[in-house]
Image (cartoon, rainbow, N blue to C red):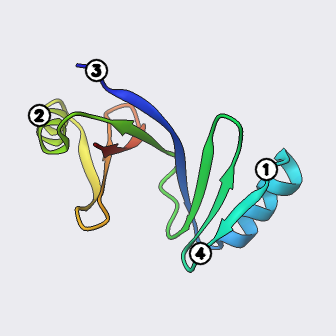
Amino acid sequence: MANTFGTDILIQALDPKAAAGFYVKELGFTITGEHDRWIDLHGDHINLFIEEGPALGPVLEVTVADVEEAKARLVASGCEIVKDEPEFPRCYVKDPYGLIYNLTK
């Protein structure tokens, strides 16, 4: 199994602008894009996306060879599908230890 972590982390906040302001002021990030429902903050080694919505906690990006196979295998191993949006495409999976990740191909 040769999965890889991406450089993207997504968080959700009820007020993405306020959250982005915190990360700019307190951690020195730079806003690199503003969209209707999310804000981009790009760094040298990581991209942080703040999307409008209820907080799920940090969502890590995991690249897999086959998203459907990975979903089935992870659910069979005790994971929970938190959000599945094939049209986007993205699938958030929460593992038994609390980590949430977005399966992507």
The answer to whether residue 17 is left or right of residue 74 is right
Instruction: Tell which circle, 2 or 3, labels the residue nearer the N-terminal end.
Output: 3
Secondary element at tag 3: loop
Q: Secondary structure at mark 1?
A: loop
**Alpha carbon distance from label 4 to label 3:** 33 Å
Give the numbered dot on residue 76.
2
User: At which x and y percent is residue 98?
Assistant: 41, 37
Q: Distance from label 1 to label 4 (Cα)?
A: 17 Å
For the point 38% across and 27% down, the residue is 4
Amino acid carrying label 3: it is Ala
Number of numbered discs visible in the structure rendering: 4
Q: Quadrant of residue 73?
A: top left
Depicted 67 relative to depicted 96: above or below: below
Alpha-carbon neighbours of circle 1 within 10 Å: few (<14), some, or many (≥20)?
some
Circle 1 residue: 29
Percent of width and height locating residue 50? 59, 61
Q: Which residue is mark 3?
A: 2
Question: If the image is split into quadrants, where does the N terminus sit?
Answer: top left
Residue 74 lies, in percent from the top left, at 19, 34
**As drawn, is 68 to the left or to the right of 100?**
left
Dot 4 or dot 3: first in sequence order is: 3
Q: Which residue is mark 4?
A: 35
Q: Are marks 4 and 2 in contact (CB under 8 Å)?
A: no
Q: CA distance from mark 3 to mark 1?
A: 31 Å
Contact between labelled residues 1 and 2, with CB atoms less than 8 Å apart? no
Mark 4: few/some/many CA within 10 Å (<14, 14-19, 20+):
few
Could you give the CA–CA distance between mark 4 and mark 2, rounded to whole angstroms?
Answer: 36 Å
- Badge 3, how many Cα within 10 Å: few under 14, some, many 20+? few
